[in-house]
Image (cartoon, rainbow, N blue to C red):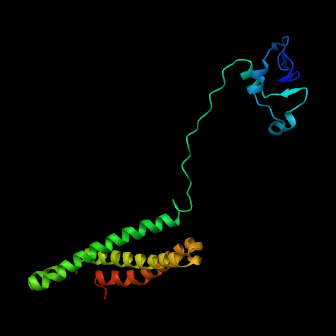
Amino acid sequence: MVLTGNRRSAPIHWKSPLSGHNPAALCLSETVFDRISVRQNRLGPHFRKEGLLVPEKTAGTLAGSAPAAPKISMPRRPAGTLYRGREGMWSWVLHRITGVAIYFFLLVHILDTALVRVSPEAYNAVINTYKTPIMGLGEIALVAAIGLHALNGLRIILIDFSSWGNKHQKLMFWIVIGLWLVLLAGFVPRQLMHIFGAH
């Protein structure tokens, strides 16, 4: 749509090249035209001395039609940030889970050791339950938790006390996982042989 006319002239004629009908006349008062706040540096190549090149939606608004309602799209779920959904988050989760598991093991271990002073027979009964295959598998889980917690703790120390560790925390996470798997590869087969009697 093209608005032709001078800014100070009273009538401004509105010519629609897309319409097959006679051009309609649109009269805008000078104050209404002032509210449009046309500035050359904002419009760039669309600003002309003799008139103003107006987009179709804007011209429709000038003609009195209601503006189209803006489309509001729902925010997309973040694909992952520096922390959330990445190695840093999983390291944090695993460190807390293994820490709580180790805490409860130590609590039970202190309680069953304290039975020695109360009743040696009860202590022996508890120790005998540790020789079952289920408890042997539990020992594998315990060693896995202690190993991961310890290695990740060293990683956290490097992140907290060195700029190098902060820059390479993602690489160190995978190094921790690799060392942890090597530790389990050396322990688990021997423990399974011990559990199931193949000494």
**Which of the pair 188/5 is nearer the observer?**
5
**Which of the pair 163/83 is nearer the observer?**
163
Q: Is residue 127 visible?
A: no
Number of disc labels: 0
As displayed, is residue 164 above or below residue 57? below
Left or right of 45? Residue 109 is left
Left or right of 43? Residue 190 is left
Outermost residue to the right? 50
Left or right of 91? Residue 114 is left
Q: Quadrant of the N terminus?
A: top right
Residue 2 screen position, x and y as percent: 85, 24
Q: Is residue 6 visible?
A: yes
Residue 133 screen position, x and y as percent: 26, 77
As displayed, is residue 93 above or below residue 43? below
Outermost residue to the top? 22
Q: Quadrant of residue 189?
A: bottom left
Residue 131 screen position, x and y as percent: 22, 81
Q: Quadrant of residue 38?
A: top right
Q: Quadrant of the C terminus?
A: bottom left
Q: Residue at x 32, y 74 (%)?
A: 102
Q: Residue at x 46, y 76 (%)?
A: 152
Q: Residue at x 42, y 76 (%)?
A: 148
Q: Quadrant of residue 24?
A: top right
Residue 169 screen position, x and y as percent: 55, 72
**Which of the pair 15/127 is nearer the observer?**
15
As displayed, is residue 183 above or below residue 93? below
